[in-house]
Image (tube, rainbow, N blue to C red):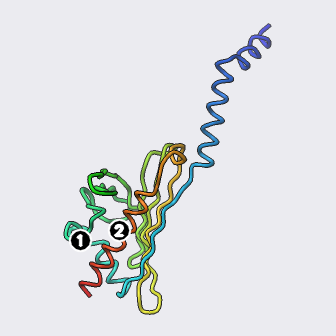
């Protein structure tokens, strides 16, 4: 009798609905991956580009995309940026500084695990006397398939141009 009730429970409409919901969430987690990628060549050394990227106190003078509101760029610290995708659309984004390799890598990340997370990297590489700066961001989560990354892509393209202009005007 107990086995029959247990079987009825496991095959009830509610449980079948829960199975379907769990399957859908797993499916969305599997397909919920996107990224944006922007690269630019700058006539400067990686050290010079690094100085501009990490001097957040001067962002308001040249940076049309990001403004540091809270925190310091130190490994392990929590920071909050005001991220401006396009005119009139700004968002406050908290993140954690995950890894710093001076003049080479600044890696930050945040978001809500399972819903949407981001892994943001500034990657600096010296090539033929210039610095190739790449801004790369990976996204994961169930919300990602329903999200359009194009405004973020455009903002990072604009940010790379801002960084290039700032660095080349200083050095």
Q: Which residue is drawn at the image coordinates 26% and 60% (left, top)?
A: 68
Q: Regarding mark 1 in the picture, which secondary structure is present there?
A: helix
Q: Is residue 108 left or right of residue 59?
A: right
Coordinates of residue 60 in the picture (x, y in percent) = 20, 66
Q: Which residue is mark 2?
A: 158
Q: Which residue is mark 1?
A: 62
Between 52 and 38, the one nearer to me in the picture: 38
Coordinates of residue 1 in the picture (x, y in percent) = 80, 7
Q: Number of callouts in the render? A: 2
Query: Relative to 127, is 158 above or below?
Result: above
Within 10 Å of disc 2 (Cα), the crowding (few <14, some 14-19, many 20+) is some
Coordinates of residue 147 in the picture (x, y in percent) = 48, 48
Q: Any mark on residue 71, and which?
A: none
Coordinates of residue 90 in the picture (x, y in percent) = 29, 52
Q: Quadrant of residue 4?
A: top right
Q: Which residue is drawn at the image coordinates 63% and 26% (left, top)?
A: 18
Circle nearer the N terminus (2, 1): 1
Frontmost of labels 2 and 1 is 2
Q: Which residue is drawn at the image coordinates 74% and 15% (left, top)?
A: 6
Q: Residue at the bottom extreme?
A: 129
Quadrant of the frame with the C terminus: bottom left
Q: Regarding mark 2 in the picture, which secondary structure is present there?
A: helix
Query: Relative to 103, is 33 above or below?
Result: above
Q: Which residue is drawn at the image coordinates 41% and 61% (left, top)?
A: 108
Query: Relative to 118, is 122 above or below?
Result: below
Query: Relative to 153, is 133 above or below?
Result: below
Within 10 Å of disc 1 (Cα), the crowding (few <14, some 14-19, many 20+) is some
Between 113 and 14, the one nearer to me in the picture: 14
How far apart are the two marked residues, 2 and 1, measured between alpha carbons? 11 Å
Q: Is residue 23 left or right of residue 103?
A: right
Q: Residue at the top extreme?
A: 1
Between 101 and 89, the one nearer to me in the picture: 89
């Amino acid at each position: 009798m107990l086995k029959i009730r247990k079987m009825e429970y496991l095959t009830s409409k509610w449980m079948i609905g829960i199975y379907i919901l769990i399957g859908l969430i797993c499916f969305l987690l599997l397909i919920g991956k996107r990224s944006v990628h922007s690269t630019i060549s700058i006539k400067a050394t990686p050290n010079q580009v690094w100085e501009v990227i990490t001097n957040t106190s001067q962002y308001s003078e040249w940076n049309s995309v990001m403004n540091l509101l809270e925190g310091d760029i130190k490994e392990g610290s929590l920071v909050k940026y005001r991220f401006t995708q396009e005119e009139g659309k700004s968002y406050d984004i908290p993140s954690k500084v995950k890894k710093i390799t001076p003049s080479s890598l600044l890696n930050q990340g945040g978001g809500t695990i399972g819903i949407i997370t981001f892994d943001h990297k500034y990657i600096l590489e010296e090539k033929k006397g210039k610095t190739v700066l790449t801004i790369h961001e990976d996204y994961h989560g169930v919300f990602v398939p329903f999200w359009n990354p194009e405004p973020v892509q455009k903002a990072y393209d604009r940010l790379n141009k801002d960084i290039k202009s700032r660095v080349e005007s200083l050095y």
